Amino acid sequence: AARAAAAGAARAPPSLSPTLPSPLASLLPPRRAFSAEPERHEFQAETRQLLDIVTHSIYTDKEVFLRELISNASDSLEKLRHLQVSGEEVRDPELPLEINITTDRTRNTLTISDTGIGMSKEDMVLNLGTIARSGSKAFVEQLRGADSPTTARGVAEGIIGQFGVGFYSAFMVADTVTAESAAAKVAGAAAPALWRSDGTGTYEVGEAGPDVSRGVKLTLQLKEDCNEFTDPERVKDIVKKYSSFVPHPIRLDGEVVSTVRALWTEDKNSVREKEYQDFYRFITGAFDMPVYTLHFRTDAPLDLKVLLFFPTFHLEKLGMGRTEPGVSVYSRKVLIESKSSDILPEWLRFVRGVVDSEDLPLSLSREKPQDSRLVARIRDVLTRRIIRFLEAEAQKDPAAFKGWFKEFGFFLKEGACQDFKFKEQIAKLLYFESSKVEKGELTSLDEYISRCPPEQKEIYHLVAPTREAAEASPYYELFKKNDVEVIFLYNTVDDFVMGNLSQYNGRTLKTVEAGDISLDSATDEDAGKLSEEDSNRLCSWLEEKLGKARVKKVKVTERLGGSPGLVPG
């Protein structure tokens, strides 16, 4: 029996309150005492394995633990708001709905508290004792399954994430996590509860003292190599990076640090232009003003809340390196991926803004959307919407759009070359100089077609370094003589665009250098031209003098007027 007792003692989980040398103990925070002997539980074997994965593997950056804990606190506040809307009496009704973060360098602790719905001891066992159990997910499913009223459904939509895996990310930075809580419900009120674990496989749970207020208070005893999270400036930077748009005030050591509204979730008719401009500057750090703002939301087939900005200028043209993607992905106002390279095609990398979708199935760490097919669908929806928006702006104010195109047209041309799926739609947004508009003015392919005769089945273009060179080109003479419009292309990428499109609106895009061009160019000057016999003799003489090494064939052409010859394409 003694041996059995000794073996049982050996198997007992280690104490969560180790005895420490006196100098070190003086630096630790005063530990919350259980009001009665706590219960001690062991995690199941698979839970311990998953806990090890969460705390050591799935997050690429330790700082995201704070994002997860703030998201959980926001969930708690949303649930309390649901109780209040339903008219249920709550504990400490005078407490404001807010999140408080406190740093303590001396004690090496970080505390995150909320005034939300709180938890009883049973809730702690259910939601914290079983890792990966989602209290928030269960709450949303309960509301939806009960065919809730619109107001309750709206509250459900406000729940950010899972109180389970995200909560345990705290053990990436903490040796010990203590949770104190008082449940909000007055009816059948449970005693305040206390939960504590070192994340190694066991936890303690029991009743706390009566002075615990409504909500949840988490105290993280930080690891020695994680004391950076006691620096208020470091914590403030993390809050602003991930949680600036959480719909509740966040206080850091008493100062409100979340003051920016998530404009993309609001009705665009209620947002003023100045607010858009301020938001643009906040997310980009830029000093210019957006030329265009696209703000919309969709409910079906995808839930999207989108706010996109089209800047005034870019630095890529100045050789400052390739422009980085500028659209970040959020889920219920919480940052998932900053400056995502997947949410828009590469040619739209100049666009800045936010895309928020709760349809995105996130990987365990919330750091990367994992369903590539769904992301591709979202990308297609956004691309179509952007193209339609720019097309509408071009029709509404052509002069303003052409001014913007001169700065950003390169990106659209890149899209016409690379984006096979949308190249025809992109082509509608392209502008060039032509022989029928003044120097410096631009025209679209649709405008070109509107000016050409119905029987003309080609759109002619000419590559030249300048307008003067284009107008002096021997290839242009025939078109000038016959008053046929030619698009002038001054950049190499323009030639690639025409070659990649090949056709537009039923007409062939054709270079004026092609050898098979024949226009009706009969004039009174034809009376003085060489006879067919003399022409053949001249061509033979030129071939002989120039030699086979220089020319393969010399022919007479009707295309020239003031130039002696040309080399057809």
Image (tube, helix red, strand yellow):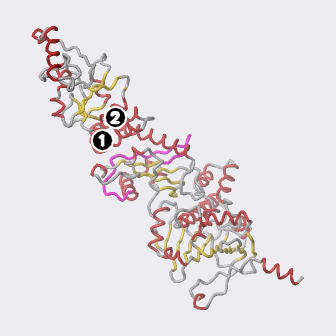
Q: Which mark is residue 405?
A: 1
Magenta span of residues:
284-305
- Tell me residue 383's x, y (percent): 44, 41
| Front disc: 2 or 1 | 2
- Tell me residue 294's x, y (percent): 41, 45
Of 166 and 492, which appears nearest the observer? Answer: 492
Q: Quadrant of residue 188?
A: bottom right
Figure check: 38 above or below 530: below
Figure check: 104 above or below 330: below
Q: Is residue 364 left or right of residue 14?
A: left
Figure check: 358 above or below 402: below
* Callout 1 secondary element: helix
Q: Residue 290: say if magenta.
A: yes
Of 211 and 528, which appears nearest the observer? Answer: 528
Q: Amino acid at mark 1?
A: Phe
- Tell me residue 341's x, y (percent): 45, 50
Q: Is residue 230 left or right of residue 284?
A: right
Of 544 and 185, which appears nearest the observer? Answer: 544
Q: Amino acid at mark 2?
A: Val
Q: Which mark is residue 497?
A: 2
Q: Residue at x 27, y 32 (%)?
A: 443
Quadrant location of the N terminus?
bottom right
Q: Quadrant of residue 387?
A: top left
Q: Tell me if mark 1 has few (under 14), some (14-19) or many (20+) residues whose alpha carbon lies within 10 angstroms of its own.
A: some
Q: Residue 83: say if magenta.
A: no
Judged from this view, the residue extending furthest toward the right is: 1
CA–CA distance in space, label 2 to label 1: 16 Å
- Tell me residue 187's x, y (percent): 72, 66
* Callout 2 secondary element: helix
Q: Is residue 290 left or right of residue 383?
A: left
Q: Residue at x 58, y 84 (%)?
A: 28
Mark 2 and mark 1 in contact? Answer it, CB < 8 Å: no
